[in-house]
Image (spheres, rainbow, N blue to C red):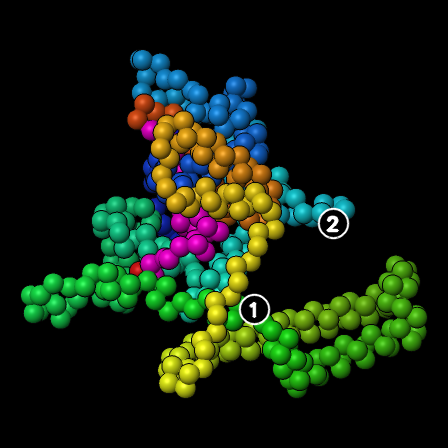
Amino acid sequence: MSEAIKMDMKNGRRNRGNPPKIKFTERHDTPAFCLVKAICGIAFKDGAFVSEWIREPEDIYGIKIPDRLQSVPIKWAAEWKQTPVFRRTVRDVKGNLETSPTLATQYHQMANWNLRLGKSFGLKEPFEFKTLRRAAAAVLPEGVRSQAMGHVNGSIHERSYRNEVVDTDIVSAFLETPSDKSTMKLIGHTSLTRDPNAPTKPTPAHRHQVQEDTEIIEARRMLDSQTQTIINRYRSLAQATRNAQHDLKLQAELDHHAQLKREHNALFKRKLRAVFEQSRKQYFETLGVICLQNQHTGNPEPPRPDEQPFRFLEREDLIRLLFPRSLPTSPQQQVENSSKIIRLISTFAITPSRLPVPTPLFLWRDFDLRITTVSRVMLCRYTKLYTALEPLLASIDNPCH
């Protein structure tokens, strides 16, 4: 399969109304980076194929190309063409999570998930979309890079995206001696400063520290005072809420109470984040000192954290297929593995982990999927493209260029 995705940049004056198309081919060597399978998995979940003969992944791999053609286009149903491909999760009337039929995934939510991913992976620096864009830009020729990223010219990359780490061994070049390429390459990777034992989320001690903060104590005092005043008059907040339907003054009091609660929670969250980030910063600043101290005093190094078990066996199966230990040995095995991947991605397309991409939107009409004589390929519309694979990057080392 192959695919072309139309990339419409909404950031400022990017593309100047002429969005590029990025080509993708199906990958069997590194399935984790195969966007074709990801899109097909979501398409099966949505039922976005117009043909009644495509109902299972095996149906795609069974398509035969007539001798007069070099490809067979796979079309989307008309009712899906204007629908965002990557959609956010919402709650139904019963409070259950479901995928919204119309609302696109939000950028800020994806950015927060990226940051959490970097922390859970033990990265020292924040794991941001720009990290991935830099990595992509670093391996592309200037002309292609500017077109793909929506830049007018190469000066934007030089000013905003070029890695501050000089990617060469200057001393070896000056001495005209061979360079240790593996070491030099590692220096530019985020994995160089990674520590899986680094703090990944706030601890009870962090929360207790924030609770003792004077600003939090004052905000809590004001909230508790307002809550007690309402309870003394109406016995409970629920009763006050019912009475407020016919009492505008009481409704104003409840609105003020809700505002105090929001302000308290926002302040607590902000303080907790600051305390946690400070603890992470201190952890990495003292890491070298502690390692040397343990080495010279005979103290054992802390063990690596235990691997968390998968909540769903299907996720474990998907990870094994996306990161295979060996390549398929036959075309039949390739088809079987690819079909399993597509089916498993379709299974998880209803959860918040459905391969997300921030705005600007991908609509189904932006994807041109074809079965070709050479390979299966796909064309798509580029935003911050590599973030489509963001949930999968926790298992590999990523360059920080």
Location of residue 363 in the rendering, given as x and y in whole percent from the top left corner: 49, 38
- Disc 2 is placed on an element classified as loop
Q: Residues within 10 Å of mark 1 (few under 14, many from 20)?
A: some
Q: Which mark is residue 95?
A: 2
Residue drawn at 74 percent across, 49 percent down: 95
- Give the Cα distance between marks 2 and 1: 26 Å
Which image quarter is the C terminus in? bottom left
Q: Is residue 95 above or below residue 72?
A: below
Q: Is residue 315 above or below residue 332?
A: below
Say which residue label 1 marks.
Answer: 201
Three-letter amino acid code at disc 2? Gly
Q: Nearer the viewer, residue 238 or 369?
A: 369
Dot 2: within a 10 Å radius of its alpha carbon, few (fewer than 14), some, or many (20 or more) residues?
A: few
Instruction: Find out whether the residues at labels 2 and 1 contact each other: C-beta distance under 8 Å.
Output: no
Closer to the observer: label 2 or label 1? 1
Image quarter of residue 23: top left
Tell me: residue 8, above or below residue 265.
above
Please give the name of the residue rendered at 41% of the width and 30% of the height, measured from the top-left corner.
333
Q: Residue furthest left?
A: 176
Q: Quadrant of the N terminus?
A: top left
For the residue labelled by badge 1, is the local secondary structure a helix, a strand or a loop?
loop
Where does the image place residue 3, in percent across and percent down from the top left? Answer: 38, 33
Amino acid at the residue labelled 1: Lys
Task: Choose between 295 and 17: the one closer to the eye.
Answer: 295
Task: Examine the rendering and report whether any part of residue 241 can be seen.
Answer: yes
Residue 391 magenta: yes
Residue 78 magenta-drawn? no
* Image position, residue 371 (x, y; %): 38, 25
In screen coordinates, is 191 left or right of 245? left
Residue 272 location in percent, x, y?
59, 75
Question: Magenta part of the protein: which range?
Answer: 375-400
